[in-house]
Amino acid sequence: MDIQRLAAPTPSNYRYAVFCCSFKWELGSTPDHAMALFADEAMAKRYGALMWPSTFEVVDRFALAEMKD
């Protein structure tokens, strides 16, 4: 792989986090971590629906910070 062709990701570019929410089926005892980050909400929802149709959630990572302002 030509590593020079890959840009280093900037986390602040990815507003939406997708969680699989294993707790909804009592499959996990620890908090779920985000499975993917997206810049576009529609893409995040599409990914979640394809991977975990009945349990996923998309969270706006910046919503709380914007509400405080």
Image (cartoon, helix red, strand yellow):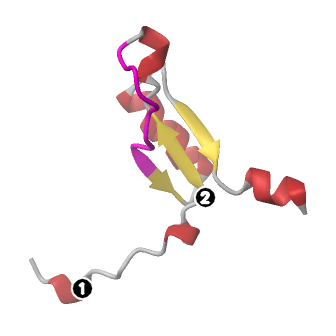
Point out which mark residue 5 bears.
1
Bounds of the magenta segment: 27-36
Question: Is residue 37 shown above or below 51?
Answer: below
Packing grade of label 2 (10 A; few <14, some 14-19, many >=20) is some
Q: Can residue 54 be seen in this view?
A: no
Q: What element carries label 1?
A: helix
Residue at 47% over, 25% down: 21
| Image quarter of the N terminus | bottom left
For this rendering, which residue is in front, 49 or 9?
A: 9
Compared across the picture, whether 20 is left or right of 4 comes to: right
Percent coordinates x, y for residue 20 in the rendering: 43, 30
| Image quarter of the C terminus | bottom right
Quarter location, residue 62: bottom right
For this rendering, which residue is in front, 38 or 24?
A: 24
Q: Nearer the viewer, mark 2 or mark 1?
A: 2
Q: Is residue 17 visible?
A: yes
Compared across the picture, whether 5 is left or right of 48 comes to: left
Residue at 58% over, 45% down: 42
Q: What residue type is labelled 1?
A: Arg
> How many numbered marks appear?
2
Residue at 45% over, 44% down: 34
For this rendering, which residue is in front, 48 or 22?
A: 22
